[in-house]
Image (spheres, rainbow, N blue to C red):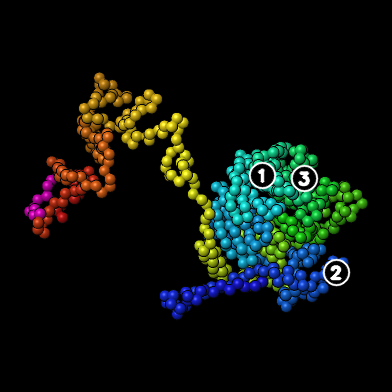
């Protein structure tokens, strides 16, 4: 653990001509998790494996042995040294959304997160600070996958859209994959194809170069929630809402076998990447299972979760280390070689050690380490750093968290609020609620500052439909070389097309016969005077006299004047009604004595109504 200096610039500080009246704002040093020291230490002291592979100092539980820490690649047979039990950092966006997918970039320098708002966010892989954000999809992103050659990134969203991205996040292709949401996708070992799983209960194998679906795998009776392509073989696995796990031949599209182990919806299916001999599945029945592909049966039953298991992931270096995330925000780590049977439970034997491995029951495995309060809500995605020293988790609580192993002599991390809860940690003094608020506020302010300094959005403006490039607003030429005229501004004025009569005017034109209104008998017309009297009593302004235009409407063909354009003649003064009493008193237009103000044209009707109620009758 190192620190990156984060002081203010000298030209902005106190007494440096920056214009500040006080000292510079104190900015803390950002902690940085740097794996370079462990790699250098291992490279300096390592030996060939037939000589023991390492000749340096062994770690001991003391802070002075931090310099002797080794990367996971130095201890392939010791997965317990790579269990991520320590919380490193919590990263959250300025505008928070649930995190659906987290993926480390192939070189491990950054972490890419995909949210339910369709945004990509890049976080620094050592300082965990914000780097950039961009709008990648129009709907929630459900799946991400990097190619094995590290040259391409493919993403899929809730609308069934698949997009191709270069490593610099340049979008080069967008295709329609499914009509329903796409839940998962995975590349083939040669990167020439990829498979997708959708809520339409089918899987599709796409040709990457052509962007077209070559094969559709049908056989599930409900939504397909997960899929994966074997890292070295022509084998595809899928998990569905129908509680079934199926293995497919991608060449013929035939279902090879169906694994009946779970009793609820399958949430994740992942092949083991180191040796490629095992398959891990998780479901909403609070269990996860590990299948041996050589025997086509389950060999391990992972227990311990009190709620549904939402996701899982294999360690990239240790083939027997498996991490699971629960729907209650818990994070468990399992070592498949260690059953960790709790007290009171019977001791079991692995199927490999039984007399008949084909018929022996699966061995229950309990977690080697628990982080019960890792997140507040369900963990949707887990992903290991390519070197295997940091685990990233994305949750429905809109926070991305980073986890690593504890350093030598560091035991207080097992009593933090992520392991024993906020109340117990506050009682033990390992967590301060008030201080944590200040720390969280400082982290949010820092993330907002980083986001303001970074690239906020890379979304290009949408192109106008039917317009030539570079000539905005110019319509496309119609067949025959004729450009149709624009629609008339005033209804009823302008040429009619295809013999369609123009729509009727909303007002009568003076000098023209008024057409009969629908629903009124012309032989028995209504009493207009009685209607006007009823409107007057109800406070509704009376209609205009016959042959006059409604207020604010211009005659046909007259273009309205621009805003602020004055008429060449002043408007006529308003005539006061006869039933309103005039104010009594001397009137002098040039002196300070009382005078009657003429109402504005737009306020005349309102003034009449108020004066009819007895208001505004005195001289001001």
**In the figure, is residue 480 to the left or right of 423?**
left
Determine the CA span between mark 1 and mark 2. Answer: 46 Å
Res 610 seen here: no
Magenta segment: does it hold 582?
Answer: yes
Tell me where the magenta segment starts and ends, as one range. Answer: 579-589
| Quadrant into which the C terminus falls | bottom left
In primary-sequence order, the first of circles 1 and 3 is 1
Comparing labels 1 and 2, the label whose residue is closer to the camera = 1
Q: Residue at x 65, y 62 (%)?
A: 109
Please tell me which residue is depicted at 51% across the width and 73% down the height of the picture: 8
The disc, 2 or 3, on the residue closer to the chain's N-terminal end is: 2
Label 3 residue SS:
loop
Using the image, determine if residue 568 lies above or below residue 12.
above
Residue linked to disc 3: 235
Mark-to-mark CA distance, 2 and 3: 36 Å
Query: Badge 1 is on which residue?
Result: 209
Q: Which of the numbered marks, if any, corresponds to residue 526?
A: none
The prevailing secondary structure element of the residues shown in magenta is loop
**Label 1 packing within 10 angstroms: few (<14), some (14-19), many (20+):** few
The question of residue 206 being in magenta is answered with no
Residue 52's label in the rendered image is 2
The location of residue 491, given as percent across then percent down, is: 33, 33
> Quarter of the image holding residue 536?
top left
Q: Residues within 10 Å of mark 2 (few under 14, many from 20)?
A: few
**Which residue: 88% across, 53% down?**
352
- Secondary structure beneath label 2: loop
In contact (CB < 8 Å): disc 1 and disc 2 = no
**Left or right: residue 57 compared with residue 510:** right
């Amino acid at each position: 653990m190192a620190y990156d200096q984060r002081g203010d610039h000298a030209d902005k500080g106190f007494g440096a001509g920056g214009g500040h009246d006080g000292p510079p704002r104190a900015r803390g040093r950002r902690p940085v998790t740097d794996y370079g020291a462990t790699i250098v230490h291992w490279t300096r002291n390592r030996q060939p494996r037939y000589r023991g592979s390492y000749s340096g100092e062994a770690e001991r539980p003391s802070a002075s042995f931090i310099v002797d820490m080794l990367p996971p690649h130095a201890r392939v047979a010791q997965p317990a040294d790579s269990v991520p039990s320590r919380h490193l950092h919590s990263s959250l966006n300025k505008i928070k959304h649930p995190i659906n997918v987290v993926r480390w970039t192939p070189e491990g320098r950054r972490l890419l997160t995909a949210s339910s708002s369709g945004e990509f966010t890049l976080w620094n892989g050592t300082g965990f600070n914000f780097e950039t954000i961009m709008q990648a999809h129009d709907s929630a992103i459900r799946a991400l996958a990097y190619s094995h050659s590290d040259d391409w990134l493919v993403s899929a969203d809730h609308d069934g859209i698949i997009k191709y991205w270069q490593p610099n996040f340049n979008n080069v292709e967008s295709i329609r994959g499914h009509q329903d949401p796409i839940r998962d996708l995975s590349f083939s070992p040669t990167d020439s194809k990829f498979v997708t799983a959708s809520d339409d209960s089918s899987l599709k194998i796409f040709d990457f170069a052509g962007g077209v679906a070559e094969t559709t795998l049908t056989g599930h009776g409900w939504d397909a929630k997960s899929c994966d392509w074997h890292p070295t073989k022509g084998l595809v696995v899928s998990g569905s809402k129908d509680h079934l796990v199926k293995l497919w031949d991608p060449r013929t599209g035939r279902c090879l076998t169906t694994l009946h182990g779970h009793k609820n919806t399958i949430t994740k299916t992942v092949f083991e990447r180191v040796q490629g001999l095992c398959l891990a599945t998780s479901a909403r029945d609070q269990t996860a299972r590990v299948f041996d592909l050589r025997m086509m049966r389950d060999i391990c039953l992972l227990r311990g979760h009190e709620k549904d298991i939402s996701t899982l992931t294999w360690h990239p270096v240790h083939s027997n280390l498996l991490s699971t995330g629960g729907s209650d925000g818990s994070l468990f780590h399992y070592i498949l070689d260690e059953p960790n049977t709790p007290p009171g439970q019977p001791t079991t034997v692995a199927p490999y050690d039984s007399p008949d491995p084909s018929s022996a029951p699966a061995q229950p495995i309990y977690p080697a380490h628990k982080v019960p309060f890792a997140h507040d809500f369900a963990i949707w995605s887990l992903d290991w750093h390519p070197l295997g020293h940091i685990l990233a988790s994305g949750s429905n609580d809109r926070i991305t968290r980073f986890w690593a192993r504890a350093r030598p002599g560091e035991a207080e991390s097992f009593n933090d609020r992520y392991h024993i809860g906020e109340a117990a940690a506050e009682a033990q003094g390992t967590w301060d609620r008030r201080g944590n608020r200040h720390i969280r506020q400082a982290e949010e302010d820092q993330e907002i500052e980083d986001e303001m300094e970074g690239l906020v959005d890379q979304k290009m403006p949408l192109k106008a439909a039917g317009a030539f490039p570079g000539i905005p607003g110019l319509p496309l030429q119609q067949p025959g070389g004729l450009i149709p005229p624009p629609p008339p501004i005033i209804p009823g004025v302008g040429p009619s097309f295809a013999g369609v009569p123009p729509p009727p005017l909303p007002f009568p034109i003076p000098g023209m016969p008024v057409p009969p209104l629908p629903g009124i008998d012309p032989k028995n017309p209504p009493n207009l005077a009685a209607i006007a009297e009823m409107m007057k009593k109800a406070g509704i302004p009376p209609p205009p006299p016959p042959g006059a235009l409604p207020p604010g409407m211009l005659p046909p063909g007259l273009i309205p004047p621009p805003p602020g354009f004055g008429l060449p003649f002043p408007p006529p003064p308003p005539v006061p009604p006869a039933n309103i009493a005039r104010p009594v008193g001397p009137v002098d237009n040039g002196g300070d004595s009382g005078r009657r103000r003429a109402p504005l044209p737009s306020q005349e009707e309102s003034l009449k109504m108020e004066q009819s109620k007895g208001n505004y009758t005195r001289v001001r």
